[in-house]
Amino acid sequence: MSGSDRLENVNPQIHSTAGQRPVTAAELDNSVTDPIDAREVFDLVRDIADPEHPLTLEQLNVVEQELIEVDPAAGLVQVQFTPTIPHCSMATLIGLSIKVKLERSLPARFKIDVRITPGSHASERAVNKQLADKERVAAATENGRLLEVVNQCLVPPAAAGGA
Amino acid sequence: MIRVLDENAMSRKLEPVCSLSGHTDRVWQVAWDPAGRTLASCSADKTVRLWSETGAGWSCATILADGHERTVRGVAFSPSGRLLASASFDSTAAVWDREQAWECAATLEGHESEVKAVAWSRSGKYLATCSRDKSVWLWELTDDRELDFECAAVLMAHTQDVKRVSWSPVEDRLASCGYDDTVRLYRDDGDDWVTGAVLKGHSSTVWAVAWDGAGKRIASASDDGTVRIWAETQPPDQWSCVALLSGFHQRAVYDVAWCPLTGLLATACGDDAVRVFAEEPGAGDGGAPAFGLVASVPRAHGRDVNAVSWSPTERGLLASAGDDNLVKLWRVSEE
């Protein structure tokens, strides 16, 4: 995807992963609607693969549950993601993967805002503006090649052969 | 600050007329023919649909497929109503001919990336297209019968994607807006098409521009959640912002439409609502206009509203398009 053979971040810091969330009795009850919460959104994005390393966004601390905000009544989901280095050229692609994953997984009524964690990237405003432009996002994901790269990042880790 | 407004306190009502389903993906834009009898809509499903009213109500009369290979982003009828232009992410604009049973009569190629909008000049002489490639192209209809178009000008004024183009209703003067947060104006100075004013003020992408019926003012809708009204304070190229509609929209404003019959302003917003504003008579000092919210439908569509368009012939009749794949018609009650 990037023209060079050298990884941008040769020695990424790998973080431990949170365990599986224990299932409660209420969640097993089909008559109770589970409100979408930050943990559920985190579960959707934690296993997205980084485009460069065989690691997940959770392992690289690119996504954290604490940086996800959900307002189920208003139908708003806000995800802040932290690129591993401030000049990461993959930032837009990573943001796009998060956005596409959530758009495919969450009910249509949710508005999904994906932004760079403030102060963590040199081109924060430009990347945020691109991710917020639904016309640009729509046109980009109609592009076969880019969509393929995004879909690669969204393949579940087991199917991808594990990290 | 978002003003919390009581819907019941609004002076008018926006009544639903009907909901038109058929598109299989988000609907990006709607446009009326000059007679107000046909409504065109275009979609990410790559088609254009034409809707008209029969005894049984509104229904889809024609589907224009096979004209574009990707999303159709914009549509516009020519002033005579005979031709329909469409803009597509496939980098082309197409022209369809009512007199040939809506066959695709011409395909305009040249843009380097997605074409976002099409607009016909009042005279019918020019078709403007705009694109992510930052340019606005003017196409001249050189042969009325053969439907030949020639590129008359390529205007490279914007520094980023151009989202919309809109011609003045009274003269061949063009406005464009886009990702560089500006609105730009163009006119023919006799020899060339030149860029006149650059309207700055929005803090994010400007999604749409619309002229008032007299061709003296412009409304712009932005990702920053506001609508700005601009007036030409000193012809030919001095414009300034004379009103700011702020605190009404909770998310990006994707479209604004200014009705030439009633003077009402309608907006399409990413918060799923359609809103109608009216100019308050005699408000403001020194003639500065003031606009008040007179009607709104909070959940006009199940998702983002992408477009609004006033009927050119029936007062208060408004069409809207949304990410819920629907086209809807509304009627604003009289005062």
Image: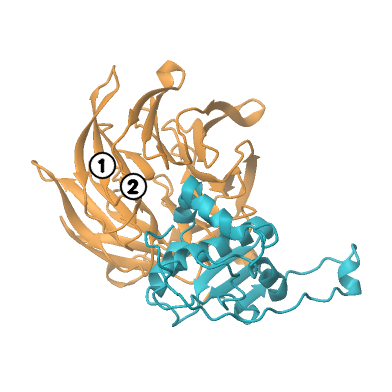
User: What colour scheme has been applied to the protein in the rendered image?
Assistant: by chain
Callout 2 amino acid: Ser
Above or below residue A96? Residue B43 is above
Query: Mark number for residue B131?
Result: 2
Above or below — where is A156 with respect to B107? below
Query: Where residue B151 sits in the image (x, y, percent)?
Result: 22, 34
Observer-nearest of B181 and B267: B181
Q: How far from the left and from the top, in percent, is residue A24?
A: 87, 75
Q: Please provide percent x and percent y for residue A34.
A: 80, 68
Q: Report helix, strand or loop for mark 1.
A: strand
Mark 1 chain: B
Residue identified by numbered label 1: B137
Asked whether the viewer can see residue A73, the reply is no
When asked about the image quadrant of residue B89, the answer is top left
Q: Are marks 2 and 1 in contact (CB under 8 Å)?
A: yes
Left or right: where does residue B18 sit relative to residue B130? right
Q: What's the CA distance linking mark 2 and mark 1?
A: 9 Å
| Residue at position x 90%, y 63% in the image | A31
Return the residue found at the far left.
Answer: B191
Residue at image position (28%, 66%) is B200
Q: Residues within 10 Å of mark 2 (few under 14, many from 20)?
A: many
- Residue at 91% over, 73% down: A25
Give the orange chain's letter: B
Q: Nearer the viewer, residue B316 or A162?
A: A162
Residue in the foreground of this view, choosing between A144 and B173? A144
Q: Earlier in the sequence, mark 2 or mark 1?
A: 2
Residue name at image x 18 percent, y 53 percent: B195
Hue used for the chain lettered A: cyan
* Placement of the C terminus of chain B among the 4 image quadrants: bottom right
| Position of residue A90 in the picture relative to residue B147 (left or right) | right
Dot 2: element: strand
The dot on residue B86 is none
